[in-house]
Image (cartoon, helix red, strand yellow):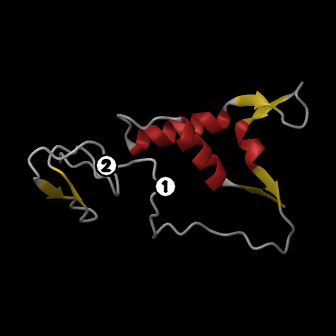
Amino acid sequence: MKVFNSKIAAEEYMSNHTLTFSTPELTLLRYSFWLGDIVPDPKDKEKTIPRLMTYLEEKSENTVVNIIDDDKYVPSGAVKKIGTNMNNDIKYCPECGKDNSIQARFCIECGKNQEE
């Protein structure tokens, strides 16, 4: 059975691409196109395959595949608090309750737009 290792693919994408001025929708769209890019086949350099195929792993039928729990968000460290808060004012995200800088446009925890 072949299984797509989405965690490794997402980590590689996030480590090589900037998220500056990106919305979650734009990031997902770019990630989808990145997975569909045609790259050299690692097994046969003369052939090309979609990048997605390089993240397929062979698993035995008895192997338990870990499912990512959508209810639990674990930050990857790709987004960190940048700069200092000039006047120490904070605002709280209405979605997750995280305290953000008063100048923040998006929550540093969940990514929700703070300007709504």
Q: Amino acid at mark 1?
A: Ser
Q: Amino acid at mark 2?
A: Lys
> Residue 76, labelled with which disc?
1
Front residue of 49/79: it is: 79
Quarter of the image for the N terminus: give it: bottom right
**Which structural element holds mark 2?**
loop
Discs 1, 2 touching: Cβ within 8 Å: no
In this view, 3 is above or below 54: below
| Residue 49 horizontal side relative to residue 70, left or right | right
**Which structural element holds mark 1?**
loop
Q: Position of residue 38 (x, y in %)?
A: 72, 29
| Residue 49 horizontal side relative to residue 78, left or right | right
- The tag earlier along the polypeptide, 1 or 2, is 1
Image point (55%, 42%), residue name: 15
| Residue 78 horizontal side relative to residue 38, left or right | left
What whole-number distance in Å separates the C-alpha atoms at marks 1 and 2? Answer: 13 Å
> Residue 27, labelled with which disc?
none
Front residue of 7/77: it is: 77
Q: Report crowding for label 2: few under 14, some 14 to 19, many 20 or more residues within 10 A (C-alpha).
A: few
Instruction: Classify residue 95 by image quadrant.
Output: bottom left
Residue beneath label 2, please? Answer: 81
Image point (91%, 32%), residue name: 44
Front residue of 101/110: it is: 101
Front residue of 51/100: it is: 100
The mark lying in front, picked from 1 and 2, is 2
Image point (66%, 35%), residue name: 36
Q: Position of residue 4 (x, y in %)?
A: 72, 54
In this view, 24 is above or below 63: above
